[in-house]
Amino acid sequence: MGGIAIKGCGKGIPRYSLHNRDLEEFLDTSHDWIVSRTGIEERRVAAPDEDNVSLSLLACGQALERAGVEGRDVDLIVVATATPDRMVPSLACTLQRELGSRGPALDINAGCSGFIYALAIAFHLMRGGIATRALVVGTETLTRIVDWRDRSTCVIFGDGAGAALLAPCPEGEGIIAASLDALGEGDGLIRAEGGGARMMASLAGGLVPGNHLLPSPLPHLHRTWNGIDPFLRMDGKEVFKFAVNKLCATVKELCSAAGVGTEEVSLIIPHQANLRILAAAAERLGVPKESFFTNIQRYGNTSAASIPIALEEALRAGMIREGDLVILAGFGAGMTWGGALLRWQDGQAIEGGRTA
Ligand code: COA
């Protein structure tokens, strides 16, 4: 049985950037506090004419082009999102229509571990002979479900999409180990009740008082559900401890499954949640903090989109070379966590398929 590799990556980034200084205008916070506690300087906010479909299509288009694959050659789409544009049907089916693809198409929700879950699902479906070319997408419009009056959450999250094209490669290259896990006991630590069948979006009321303070084009984001709390809420301190533990455990588990030492890993691309989480994990793992790729400074936490966006940027920056060992690792709502260890294979030549 051959291997499965990521052959092309892409990202879809909203046009509008909201800097910490902009938040100071309407929120009791400061640029210095946000930078010192999280590392975030700015985040992207989807404008009214942008959504998960448009951002994902940008990301998928880049991933396909870089892999030299046409949309019609894709026979599996797995999308990870915690903020789908609508409940039914799945975003994956809409992407399939737009891209002219075929085969199974499904959405999954594993919070900020979503991309890793989607990657592992696609990997195993491909290994099982269900598909030969897969698009794995992580996409979020979190700024539409955060409470812009809640400084403990709204400063953290941002919008965006990332995609990876998976195709066959020689055994021992590409994805060489993957791990997934969840602890449902932590299901209250990060939650958003709005928009589900128990709290239908049709209950939406008017704009929250004070929205007029927000800079354009944000006022469209603020809706309330007649007294019911629909917004994203988080127990930041508990999540912080969980994240450091699970990130370290995932890196160790993947290295041990593949029989390699952590020092052999060239780059770790973690979910971009907080620079302090990454610094604490680096210290605990005994690796330099430069082992972790970071771009949270510019995008905030984009949940399921953060790892594919980071991977695309690491590749574009020339930080990953043929043969490098790379770890992707995520953790998030559920609580969920997981990772993948890859021996990087150059994205241009696809076995048994088209080439760029
Ligand atoms: N600006 C200014 N002050 C703020 C603030 C903000 N944006 N957010 C919270 N504060 C205040 C609090 O009200 C509190 O004030 P008090 O001492 O007067 O009560 C103080 O800062 C400390 O709050 P605390 O919640 O203890 O801060 P913290 O050091 O734990 O940092 C987080 C808060 C959210 C940044 C941090 O807990 C975190 O990053 N957790 C992980 C979150 C995460 O990664 N989630 C996604 C995982 S997938």
Image (cartoon, helix red, strand yellow):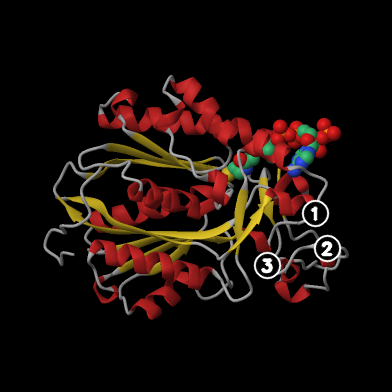
For the residues bearing labels 2 and 3, Cβ distance under 8 angstroms: no
Amino acid type, label 2: Leu
Q: Amino acid at mark 1?
A: Glu
* Position of 139 relative to 302 (above/below): below
Query: Where is residue 325 drawn, in percent x and y?
Result: 27, 36
Image coordinates for residue 164, horizontal then vertical, percent: 35, 58
Q: What crowding class fits label 2: few (fewer than 14 Cα within 10 Å), some (14-19), or many (20 or more)?
A: few
Foreground mark, 3 or 1, reads 1
- Horizontal side of residue 169 vs 248, given as left or right: left
Residue for point 53% across, 49% down: 112
Question: What numbered label is drawn on residue 25?
Answer: 1
Residue ID at (30%, 72%): 103
Residue 281 left/right relative to 45:
left
Which comes before the other along the chain, label 3 or label 1? 1
| Cβ atoms at labels 3 and 1 below 8 Å apart | no
Earlier residue among tags 2 and 3:
3
SS class of the residue under badge 3?
loop
* Residue 213, disc: 2
Q: Residue 206, relative to residue 347: is it above or below?
A: below
Q: How far, Cα to Cα, is label 2 from label 3?
A: 25 Å
Residue linked to disc 3 = 195
Q: Quadrant of residue 344?
A: top left
* Residues at marks 1 and 2 touching, judged by CB atoms closer than 8 Å: yes
Ligand 1 picture quarter: top right
Q: Residue furthest front?
A: 21
Q: Earlier in the sequence, mark 1 or mark 2?
A: 1
Depth check: give the residue in front, 199 or 48.
48
View extreme (left): residue:
352
Could you tell me how far apart the alpha carbons at marks 3 and 1 are, in whole angstroms? 29 Å
> Regarding mark 1 in the picture, which secondary structure is present there?
loop
The answer to whether the residue bearing label 3 lies less than 8 angstroms from the nearest atom of ligand 1 is no
Residue kind at label 3, given as amino acid type: Gly
